[in-house]
Amino acid sequence: MRLAVTGGKGGVGKSTVAYNLGAATGAVVVDGDLGMADLPTAHGPDLHDVLAGRADPVEAVREDGPVKLLPCGRSLAGSRAADVTELVRTAAAVEHAYGDVILDCPAGMAADAGIPLLVADRSVLVALPDAFALPDALRTRALARELDAGLAQVVLNKVGDRPPAAAVERALGAPVTTIPESAAVRRAGRTGQPVQKVAPDGPVARAFDSLAAAVSPRDCLTPTR
C-alpha cells in the first residue's frame, strides 16, 4: 500500500506524522518534499539522485536508522534536476521491494504536492486544531479526491484539552485521530528519533499506534508495537 501524508500548509507537523507513522508500521517513509525536505538526512544517494536518474530507488533506501527512509536532498540544484514524475516509478519499486510506503508530501497545492497524491492509494490529512486551518484542509481533501487518493484519516496535530475532533470529522467527512501537544515530540525531533523511542508509553506514542491501526487494512500496514 502507498499512503500519502499531506497537509494544506506548512508547519502543521506533516513530516512528524509521516515519520512516526513509519515507525509505528514498519513502512518505508519517502521524503517527497523536494524543495523543503524536513526528515532526517543520510549519507549516500537520496531522492534527488533517484529522480534525476543517478541512483536506483531501492538502493537509496536507508535501513540503518530507527525508521526505514528514502531521504531527500537539501540542495537547490538537486531539486531542479529532479524529475518529479519519476516518483511514480520510484514508489512502485520501493513498494515491490519492501511492501508498504508512506509518502511525505510537500505543503500547498502546487504540482509537486499533487504527484505524491497521484502515486498514493490512500491519504492522511494533517491539520492544526484551529478554524484558520480548515479551508486549507478542505482544499487538500478535494485535491486528494480528484487524484483518487481516498482520505483514510484526518490527524489533528498539537491539540490541547478540548480538540474539535467531532466538528472536523463532520466538515471533512473522515475519521479523526488527535495527537496531543507534547515536549516528547519536540525532543524526538531534535534527535531524529520517532517519539516511540523517546516516550514509548506516553500519550503521543499511543496516538500514533491508534493512527497506524486506523489506516491499516488487514492485508496491508500492520503496527509494529
Image (cartoon, grey):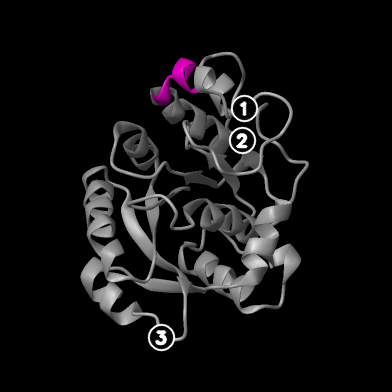
* Amino acid type shown at disc 3: Arg
Residue 192 is situated, as x and y percent measured from the top left of the image, at 70, 51
* Amino acid type shown at disc 2: Pro
- Residue drawn at (50%, 22%), measured in percent from left and top? 76
Q: Quadrant of residue 136?
A: bottom left
Q: How many marks?
A: 3
Q: State the CA–CA distance, disc 3 to disc 1.
A: 41 Å
User: Which of disc 2 and disc 1 is earlier in sequence?
Assistant: 1
Find the magenta span and give its range: 79-84
Q: Quadrant of residue 57?
A: top right
User: Which of disc 1 and disc 3 is earlier in sequence?
Assistant: 1
Residue carrying label 2: 71
Judge whether 149 appears above or below 156 on screen.
above
Whether residue 224 is visible, yes or no, is: no
Residue 141 is situated, as x and y percent measured from the top left of the image, at 26, 55
Instruction: Indicate which disc residue 162 carries.
Output: 3
**Which of pointers 3 and 1 indicates the residue nearer the eye?**
3
* Amino acid type shown at disc 1: Asp
Task: Find out whether residue 50 is within the magenta segment.
Answer: no
Residue carrying label 1: 46
Residue 145 is situated, as x and y percent measured from the top left of the image, at 24, 50
Q: Quadrant of residue 68?
A: top right
- Residue drawn at (30%, 32%), measured in percent from left and top? 111
Cβ atoms under marks 3 and 1 closer than 8 Å: no
Check the picture and name the quadrant holding the C terminus. bottom right
- Residue drawn at (69%, 62%), measured in percent from left and top? 187
Magenta segment, principal secondary structure?
A: helix
